Image (spheres, helix red, strand yellow):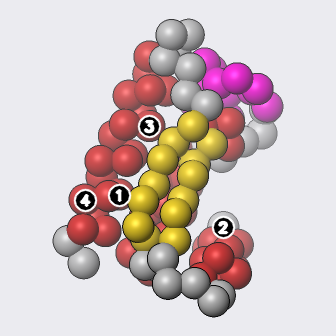
Amino acid sequence: MRPVIADAIARAGDGCDRIYVSVDIDVLDPGFAPGTGTPEPGGMNPADLLRAVRSIALETPLVALDVVEVGVEDDPRSGQLALLMILIEVRRADSR
């Protein structure tokens, strides 16, 4: 996972001063986020997603981050996970 994230960071940061990240909750396996709009088995687990977002937040000039496709009506836990992720990672980025 780490080499993929490192490559994504290198590509995204090439020639730009700031990075905006949009996390689509569909990237998670539906076992962890069943309320997503297009559930696909075999997705990431929350720990890997948090590691990826943490790496991006700490290693890039992150200006903003959002989480999309969160079906809070169908699955309030996914919404809570997304909100927690944003708060943790944005806080980490602010403290660097």
What residue is pinned by disc 3?
82
Q: Marks 1 and 2: in contact by CB < 8 Å?
A: no
Q: CA distance from mark 2 to mark 1?
A: 18 Å
Per the image, label 2 sits on a secondary structure element best described as loop
Q: CA distance from mark 1 to mark 4?
A: 5 Å
Amino acid type indicated by mark 2:
Met
Disc 2 or disc 1, which is closer to the eye? Answer: 1
Is residue 3 shown above or below 46?
below
Please rate how many residues cluster around mark 4, counting C-alpha atoms within 10 Å: few if below 14, some from 14 to 19, many from 20: few
Q: Which mark is residue 1?
A: 2
Per the image, label 4 sits on a secondary structure element best described as helix
Q: CA distance from mark 3 to mark 1?
A: 11 Å
What residue is pinned by disc 4?
91
Q: CA distance from mark 4 to mark 3?
A: 14 Å
Could you tell me which residue is drawn at 51 percent across and 10 percent down?
A: 73
Taking the magenta stretch, the answer to whether it contains residue 30 is: yes
Is residue 33 shown above or below 72?
below
Quick check: can you spot residue 31? no
Q: Which mark is residue 89?
A: 1
Per the image, label 3 sits on a secondary structure element best described as helix
Amino acid type indicated by mark 1:
Glu
